[in-house]
Image (cartoon, rainbow, N blue to C red):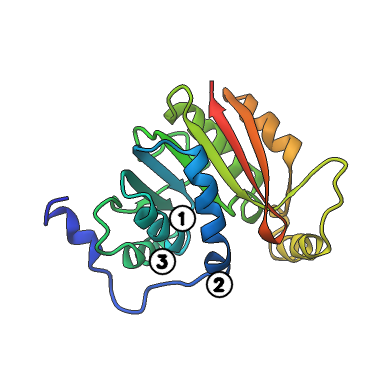
Amino acid sequence: MSDRDRSWLAPPEGVRRHAPATLRNRAAIATMLGELQPSAGAVLEVASGSGEHCAYFAEHFPKLEWHPSDPDPDALASIAAWCEGLDNVRPPVALDATAATWPVAHADAILCINMAHISPWAATLGLMAGAGRLLPPGGPLILYGPYREAGVPTAPSNEEFDQSLRARNAEWGLRVLDDVIAAAAAQGLAFERRVAMPANNLIVAFRRS
């Protein structure tokens, strides 16, 4: 990365956001990423939030080039702050998952953590459409978060979380995993794995057919 490219790595002081759950889940997520994502190439993270996950994964997977994104300008500043000095992280870009075109031309893998339930359903549909456009055959789309599953009791903590989300925004809430899988299939993304994670979350992985 040239010195000119590093201009984005000088954010104002005090812009770093902190999501406490990141410290609890990042190691477990990284373990699964080691199994699911390619050993080299470009990883687009959709809805990077604070940027803490991206910074952690970039350090643990130095052969991958990380492309963080978020629609929120304050989040973009936080991402830049957390990823300062990491040579394998590209400048964060403003990306709305629902948009028909994204500001990224290609990705060998796409990662999306805790977005589906904290956004309208249209965002998940847009994520699937974008992954269908960008990923090469065999490229993975990796999701992390809580979901509802047919025949599986929802944990009380997840039920409370769902109620709190819907109280904040009626379009938010835990998604039904079968609906997510169907939306992915409609965009040429084949369901590959469902992995139980700590704190009643799941890793859900798809592959571009």
Query: Is 112 situated left or right of 149 in this image?
Result: left
Q: Amino acid at mark 2?
A: Pro
Between disc 3 and disc 1, whose residue precedes? 1
Q: Are marks 3 and 1 in contact (CB under 8 Å)?
A: no
Q: Nearer the viewer, mark 2 or mark 3?
A: 2
As rendered, which of 208 and 115 lies closer to the eye? 208
Q: Amino acid at mark 1?
A: Ser
Which numbered circle lies on residue 20? 2
The percent position of residue 111, horizontal first and vertical second, equals 49, 44
Which numbered circle lies on residue 140? none
Within-10-Å neighbours for mark 1: few <14, some 14–19, many 20+: many
Q: Which residue is located at x 34 percent, y 37 percent?
A: 40
Q: Are marks 1 and 2 in contact (CB under 8 Å)?
A: no
Residue 47 lies, with reference to residue 183, above or below; the image says below
Within-10-Å neighbours for mark 3: few <14, some 14–19, many 20+: some
Query: Is 147 situated left or right of 77 in this image?
Result: right
Residue 122 lies, with reference to residue 56, above or below; the image says above
The percent position of residue 29, horizontal first and vertical second, equals 54, 53
Q: What is the distance, in whole Å, between disc 3 and disc 1 at their CAs?
A: 11 Å
Q: Nearer the viewer, mark 1 or mark 2?
A: 2
Which numbered circle lies on residue 48? 1
The percent position of residue 142, horizontal first and vertical second, equals 55, 41
Residue bearing mark 3: 74
As rendered, which of 29 and 165 lies closer to the eye? 29
The percent position of residue 84, horizontal first and vertical second, equals 28, 64
Within-10-Å neighbours for mark 2: few <14, some 14–19, many 20+: few
Q: Which residue is located at x 35 percent, y 57 percent?
A: 59
Between disc 2 and disc 3, whose residue precedes? 2
Residue 201 lies, with reference to residue 109, above or below; the image says below
